Image (tube, rainbow, N blue to C red):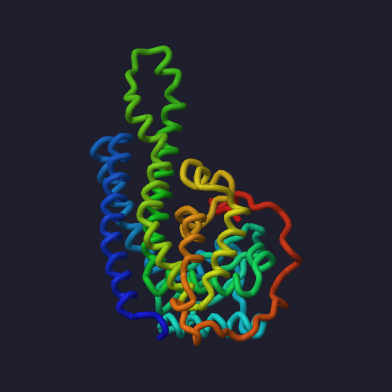
Amino acid sequence: MYVDTEKWQMHAWRNRTQSVILLLLMFGYAGFLGYLLWGSAGFILTVMVSIFALTISPNLPPTLLMNMYKAIVITPNQAPGLHHRLEILSHRAGLPKKPELYYFPSSALNAFAVGAKDHSAIAISDGLLNTLDSEELTSVLAHEISHIRSDDTWVMGVADLFSRITSLLSLVGQLLVLINIPLIIYTNLSINWIAIVLLIIAPSISALTQLALSRTREFDADLNAARLTGNPESLARALAKIENRHGGWFEHIFLPGRRTPEPSILRTHPATEERVRRLLSLKPKDMPQKYRTLPPLSSDYTFLNPRVNSRPRWRVNGLWY
């Protein structure tokens, strides 16, 4: 193992602490929204649904999400160089098993990881494969492996679940207001406008919570990815390219998903400029020489369909790719 085990353990402990905070926020805020909509019964129902979803989600196989993205497995025969690098990075990170590698047809510059250390998967988009060079792509894989090694994938799954539940409750609340507009206009029906405002801003509050909880996690994943590859500059270049395609921080926080909605791993990243600055501040002495050599990576991917040129769009399953 090439990365300090003690640092991984400290990071995992911090993640567990943040997970507890996230769970409390998720249950409390979702329950509060349920209470605003349906009273005490709504609070109990919302919390029960949240607990049920939280219990089921960690046991879902990675292939389930991959199927939702119409992702296909990338075999070692199709991309031997990519798999070889993935094997090396997984070994350096101390993963018990190399993650499965998937490709999904989307022009968005996107990559995400799902699953636990012993059963995980990484998906990379068509846009990413056709935009990043081999070193940048390797750094993105190292970033995802760092998330898997630190159990970030489960935490981010909880954050994404929290976001979806609050967004659903917000939508239900707004629909109920629209349906009752005639009663509001022609009768003396009183409306709790504070509750309405809270329902409307619920998705933004959820996004801000995700951003606050993910900031340190993302910086650590960047640093560990740089250590795994020995090349912080390549990850900095990859982040800059992704940022140029995906827009700035305002859209990510206050308009989550309006331009290029994406899995939690990208939506909750802190400011790219700060991440790039930290990566470029790493000195050569921070990157051991023996980590800097990786086998050549060919860009001839036989699994690729004709390049995806269509813009990402909403799908029936609620995903954007």
Q: Residue 83, position in %: x, y?
A: 58, 82
Left or right of residue 119: residue 236: right
Left or right of residue 98: residue 313: right
Name the quadrant of the N terminus.
bottom left
Give the residue at x 65% y 85%.
Answer: 77
Q: Quadrant of the rendered structure where residue 7 is?
A: bottom left
Give the residue at x 41% y 49%.
Answer: 163
Q: Residue 280, position in %: x, y?
A: 51, 65
Q: Residue 150, position in %: x, y?
A: 37, 71
The one nearer the camera, 1 or 304, is 1
Give the residue at x 74% y 64%.
Answer: 307
Q: Residue furthest right?
A: 306
Q: Residue furthest left?
A: 40
Q: Residue 206, position in %: x, y?
A: 39, 46
Q: Quadrant of the rendered structure where residue 286 is?
A: bottom left
The one nearer the camera, 244 or 49, is 244
Q: Is residue 244 positioned above or below 146 on the image? A: above
Give the residue at x 54% y 75%.
Answer: 231
Q: Is residue 263 positioned above or below 4 on the image? A: above
Name the quadrant of the C terminus.
bottom right
